[in-house]
Amino acid sequence: MAHDLKNIIIIGAGGNLGPSILESLDTDPYFNVSVLSRKGSSSKFPSHVKVFPIDESYPENELHDAFKGQDGIVLLLPPNEVEKQKRIIDVAIKAGVKRVIPGEFGSDTTKKEIIEAVPIFSDKVEITKYLQSKEDTGLSWSGIINGGFFDWGLKADFLGFDLKARTVTIFDEGNVKSNFTLLSTIGKAVGETFKHSAKTANKYLFINSYHVSQLEILESLKKATPGQEWKAEHVGTEALQKEGFEKLAKYDFSGIRDLLQAAIFGKIPVQDYTKYEELANDTLGLPKPEPLDEVVAKIVRGEKV
């Protein structure tokens, strides 16, 4: 039944994405949003948002108390905490929760080529498969695939651009188009997924704000910084991927960043899901993004997008 998921609890509302999801749900009068937060966490939330503190071990009794009366869960724990998330899902079923949105929010993990390129994504697959195995209990799920975080990635030098130093690392030729979504749009997508519960049950939802290459982003950055020189260096994604795997073999987890960048900007045939999936932007009623030049200029000026 549609329009029945109003009481939502977010697990992992700090971090890069959590605040945008919390803000989107909190500012929508349709929802009653709360947060489950570790007792030792330093994350801060708006004073009017109900916070359920929980022990680091996530005991079942505390989970059950937090889940009573909840319609949906946004599960944003680190993907490698697989067993903890399975336990959360089990308690959610017992408490009568109707929908879980797991921590996909990235590349299309349904494709084996993506998993081979970024093996840590296999944890996301395991969690979603566990949710799929519980569909007969009455618990449904929705996986949101949004590509990279555009505004965060641009500000954090994850897309290859150092906004302060005015330098750019161009991966291969820089002309591979990839999918990116604004954090605010992802937050909106989460809310609309709950609102359109019948249309969004037990499926992946593919969204984006921009389908662009590094070279297109660089042109927008040049327009936003007139008279300033952008110095570029080129890095091959095959070499970057090799370096990433070598780092991980030595327990240097900075290699994860290398693997992610190589997957996003490299030549993996399935990295661009617009070629084989229909976007759910219209189904979810997502706002049309501002032109690339305008949103990049706002990010450069430090404005909210």
Image: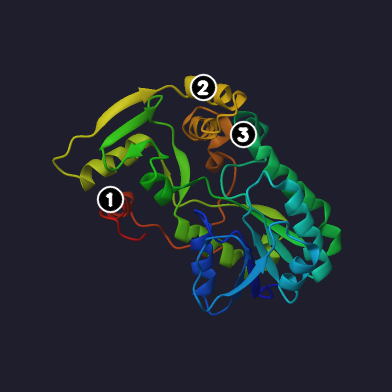
Residue 58, horizontal then vertical, whole percent = 73, 59
On-image quarter of the N terminus: bottom right
Res 113 seen here: yes
Q: Residues within 10 Å of mark 2 (few under 14, many from 20)?
A: some
Q: Earlier in the sequence, mark 1 or mark 2?
A: 2
Q: Which mark is residue 57?
A: none
Residue 282: in sight, yes or no? no
Q: Is residue 300 left or right of residue 252?
A: left
| Mark whose residue sits in front, 3 or 2 | 2
Q: Which mark is residue 114?
A: 3
Q: In the picture, residue 242 is in which quadrant?
A: top right
Amino acid tagged 2: Glu
Q: Residues within 10 Å of mark 3 (few under 14, many from 20)?
A: many
- Name which residue type carries label 3: Ile
Return the residue at label 1: 300
Q: Measured along the vertical axis of the image, is residue 198 above or below residue 238?
A: below
243 and 98: which is toward the camera: 243
Measure the C-alpha gap from mark 3 to mark 1: 31 Å
Distance in Å between CA atoms under marks 1 and 2: 30 Å
The coloring applied to the image is rainbow
Q: Circle 1: is it few (<14), some (14-19), or many (20+) Cα within 10 Å?
A: some
Which residue is denoted by mark 2 in the rendering? 243
- SS for callout 2: helix
Residue at x-position 50% and y-position 21%: 238
Q: Confirm or deny contact between disc 3 and disc 1 (CB under 8 A).
A: no
> What residue is shown at x 38% (from left), y 25% (from top)?
173
Residue at the image position 66 percent from the left and 54 percent from the top: 102
Secondary element under disc 3, as helix, strand or loop, is helix
